[in-house]
Amino acid sequence: MAEAEKTLQEVLGAFDFGAPVVGAIRYGCGHINDTFVVHTQPEDACCRRFILQRMSAAAFKRPDELMENIIGVTEYLGREIEKHNGDRDREAMRVLRPRSGEPFYTDSLGGAWRVYPFVERTICYQSAESAELFAASGRAFGRFQRLLGGYPAKTLHETIPNFHNTEDRLAKFKAALAADPLGRAKDCQQEIDFVLAREKDCSVALDAMRAGKLPLRVTHNDTKLNNVLMDEETCEGMCIIDLDTVMPGLVIYDFGDSIRFGANHSAEDERDLTKVNLDVDLFAAYTAAFLEGAGGSLTDGEIQYLPWGAKLMTLECGIRFLTDYIDGDHYFHTSREGQNLDRCRTQFKLVQDMESRWEELQGIVDQYRK
Ligand code: ADP
Ligand code: GN1
Ligand code: MG
């Protein structure tokens, strides 16, 4: 048996799925964790599925702290959802602990694994097929933000230190560039210059936070469209997933990361940049829905800075893809050569679009200012 298969069998044996496992296969389009879907066959019911994940060791140095956050957040959300008469099992994830009772299982090679019941009758979209769908994701992320409004932020561990600290991302980019371990910098001079021309932008959100204009809240920090499961019947956001980066952050990060990924009609790694265009109507639809979901909880300063959230999350993500490309592709999963550079290029094209349509974006959010 190959080593990977042996490990998978070891891990499957560490959990009690309540019925025999009939198969486990790779699943989903995440860039970070190794995700599998596990099929089980109860005797007198139809197949029950689970999500099994090996947490990325490159991204998460402390799986124990990470799982403490996730258990805390999912249990808190569960209680809030029950208070609002929601469907606890479909609107918030649950953690299925291994037989040992620990929050996760460590395999004999040191990999850290966790299991969630699969949230059924939902669809995970990779692109916004309509403004209604994108708006539904916005309402769900806004609501998530509101539901976690009372969460004791101080108890959360910083699972990835300085995750959305754009100044720090810029510093790490410069360090990678100085080291240039594979001699790749010569292939991306245009992109390097693009970043260096926007050094000052990297401080805009942090400066506003330091000046007291943007409060720290509990935020998701990775609000891609494929991190919300949509109800297959109503097409409303059912369950927010990928809670690895729930940490104190700025609300404009959550807004901005959704716009970065969803307010256009191309894949994140599209090579034909003529296809990569910011869709301002999608931006407007998401803005209205996110603010509706957040239920009036955003301050005037936060609303004012929403376009900056969009631009900064897009610029920062492009910087991160470029850094990983220069470093040798150790962080984001890749399936072909140059994929991280292609991803960086789509992000920078979107940043350019945002810059050239800045007044329009600001006009849209200004309608909601108090
Ligand atoms: P990554 O951090 O690598 O993006 P995710 O936690 O987002 O990992 O999971 C990857 C994919 O697995 C998701 O995009 C989604 O399709 C699927 N997924 C994750 N958790 C669940 C769940 N509880 N129920 C159904 N699908 C899930
Ligand atoms: C990663 O985990 P996933 O695939 O949902 C990354 C995000 C990036 C995104 C780019 C923990 O998100 O920060 O914005 O890729 N997550 C982590 O697609 O680094
Ligand atoms: Mg994900």
Image (cartoon, rainbow, N blue to C red):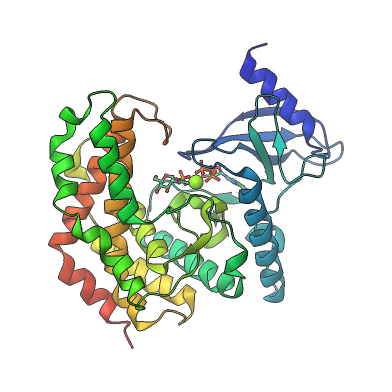
Front residue of this view, candidates 302 and 78 = 302
Q: Position of 242 compared to 213: left or right?
A: right
Mark count: 0
Q: Residue at x 39, y 56 (%)?
A: 164
Corner quadrant of residue 157: bottom right
In the picture as drawn, the residue positioned furthest to the bottom comes out as: 370
Measured as percent of width and height from the top left, residue 179 is found at: 27, 31
Position of 175 compared to 87: left or right? Answer: left
The foreground one among 165 and 151 is 165
The answer to whether residue 27 is visible is yes
Identify which residue is drawn at 58% across, 51% down: 122
* Residue 119 visible in the snapshot: no
212 vs 241, left or right, is: left
What residue do we see at 67% from left, 41% from top? 114
Q: Residue 360 is drawn in which quadrant?
A: bottom left
Give coordinates of residue 137: x percent, y percent. 46, 61
Residue shown at the point (42%, 70%) measured from the top left:
290
Quadrant where the C terminus is found in the figure: bottom left
Judge whether 212 appears above or below 35 on screen: below
User: Percent from the top left, x then y, of residue 92?
Assistant: 64, 59
Q: Is residue 353 above or below residue 272?
A: below
Left or right of residue 105: residue 344: left
